[in-house]
Image: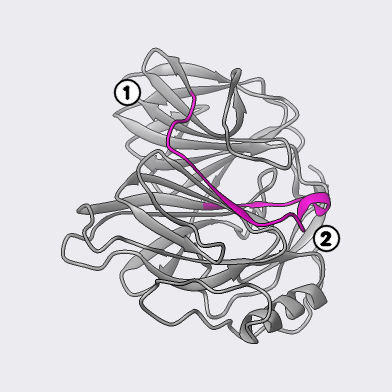
């Protein structure tokens, strides 16, 4: 999915300056962003108070939207660099096309994982004949320097491992959880898991104390470590946890995101992750001049032009708390 913000700002993320080295309960509110004509998303990362969670650098939550009489998601061809995109649905379908020639419909609780590496472009749209509701999350994982020039590729995994406990079904999207390992390719230690909780469930999820974590609320009413989280909000949990208490007041859907704190400072703008303003500027020029990111065929519409790139921004300074 694209960042369609036409006023996209340059954001410096990563490094340990913003990592909280102990358990915390930091509730993040979303920023509402229009995605095309018919889809509004709630943006949780990057957030004014929190830039990354491990290598997770971008989180949008959307829906549930009634698109029975609408076109639904329509994201024109656009570029990516230096990251992986993770498509995750609870309702609906998304048709993925990319400049490698991939054509894949991603359905609920199937993993659509695109590794941009040095350069790729893609589009995403609701199929012409689609389900009534569209509900999901789009996430980006920053690639570490050693792997950010990797050959671009797309993976689709319909069968993912699960971890179960009374009242809980946890689907492992990326990384590993309680011994279950996702088939999706990762390039840094991280985890992403979909948590389906039944009403009245109380359980504790095992965690890695070296990871920092956050929980995105997708649906229902649940408490994470005693904190109620409403759909479209995210609770940042810091590091140093070995388990996470969960309680469901109704049937509820959550996403657990975590990973080792991302050591490198990155520069994120529009749909690119790089290491310098000059690198971002070069990527923008490569997209506008059609020299770098390939072509997406089959999408009925024009590709997305890049917004204007702001001047060089000063790097923020942070501290480990």
Instruction: Tell which of 59 and 200 is nearer to you.
Output: 59
Extreme residue toward the top, this view: 166
Q: Is residue 231 magenta?
A: no
Q: Quadrant of residue 71?
A: bottom left
Q: In this view, does 176 lie above or below 60?
A: above
Few, some or many C-alpha atoms within 10 Å of disc 2 (few <14, some 14-19, many ≥20)?
A: few
Q: Residue at x 75, y 50 (%)?
A: 18
Numbered tag placed on residue 104 in the rendering? none
- As measured in the structure, the alpha-carbon distance from the residue carrying label 2 to the one carrying label 1 is 42 Å
Q: Which residue is drawn at 67% across and 50% down?
A: 52
Q: Name the residue under label 1.
A: 198
Does the image show residue 238?
A: no
Mark 2 or mark 1: which is in front? 1
Question: Where residue 133 appears, x then y in whole percent?
Answer: 24, 52
Q: Is residue 14 left or right of residue 309?
A: right
- In terms of secondary structure, where does tag 2 sit? loop
Q: In this view, does 109 lie above or below 69?
A: above
Q: Which residue is drawn at 17% across and 60% down?
A: 68
- In terms of secondary structure, where does tag 1 sit? loop
Q: Does the magenta stretch include residue 142?
A: yes
Identify the image quadrant of the C terminus: top right
Q: Mark 2 points at which residue?
A: 317
Question: Where residue 139 appears, x then y in whole percent?
Answer: 54, 52
Q: Is residue 17 above or below residue 210?
A: below
Q: Quadrant of residue 48?
A: bottom right
Q: Give the range drawn in magenta.
A: 139-161
Q: In this view, does 13 lie to the left or right of 33?
A: right
Question: Where residue 107 appears, x then y in whole percent?
Answer: 35, 45
Question: Where residue 92 appears, x then y in whole percent?
Answer: 29, 50
Q: In this view, does 301 lie to the left or right of 310?
A: left
Q: Which of marks 2 and 1 is nearer the N terminus?
A: 1
């Amino acid at each position: 999915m694209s960042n369609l913000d036409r006023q996209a700002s340059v954001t410096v993320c990563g490094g340990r300056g913003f990592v909280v080295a102990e358990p915390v309960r930091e509730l993040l509110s979303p920023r509402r962003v229009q995605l095309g004509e018919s889809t509004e998303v709630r943006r949780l990362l990057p957030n004014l108070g929190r830039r990354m969670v491990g290598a997770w650098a971008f989180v949008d939550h959307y829906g549930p939207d009634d698109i029975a009489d609408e076109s639904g998601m329509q994201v024109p061809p656009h570029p990516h660099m230096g990251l992986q995109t993770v498509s995750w649905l609870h309702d609906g379908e998304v048709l993925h096309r990319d400049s490698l020639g991939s054509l894949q419909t991603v359905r609920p609780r199937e993993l659509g994982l695109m590794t941009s590496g040095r350069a790729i472009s893609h589009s995403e749209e609701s199929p012409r004949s689609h389900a009534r509701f569209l509900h999901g999350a789009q996430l980006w994982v920053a690639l570490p320097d050693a792997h950010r020039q990797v050959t671009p590729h797309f993976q689709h995994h319909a069968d993912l491992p699960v971890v179960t406990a009374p009242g809980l079904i946890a689907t492992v999207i990326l990384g590993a959880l309680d011994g279950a390992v996702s088939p999706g390719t990762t390039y840094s230690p991280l985890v992403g898991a979909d948590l389906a909780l039944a009403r009245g469930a109380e359980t504790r999820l095992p965690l890695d104390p070296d990871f920092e974590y956050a929980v995105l609320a997708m649906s229902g009413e649940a408490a994470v470590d005693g904190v109620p989280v409403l759909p479209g909000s995210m609770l940042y949990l810091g590091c140093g946890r070995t388990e996470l208490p969960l309680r469901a007041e109704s049937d509820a859907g959550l996403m657990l995101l975590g990973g080792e704190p991302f050591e490198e400072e990155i520069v994120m703008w529009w749909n690119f992750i790089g290491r310098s303003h000059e690198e971002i500027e070069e990527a923008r020029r490569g997209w506008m001049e059609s020299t770098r990111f390939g072509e997406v065929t089959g999408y009925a519409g024009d590709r997305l032009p890049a917004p204007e790139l702001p001047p060089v921004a000063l790097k923020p300074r942070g501290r480990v708390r």
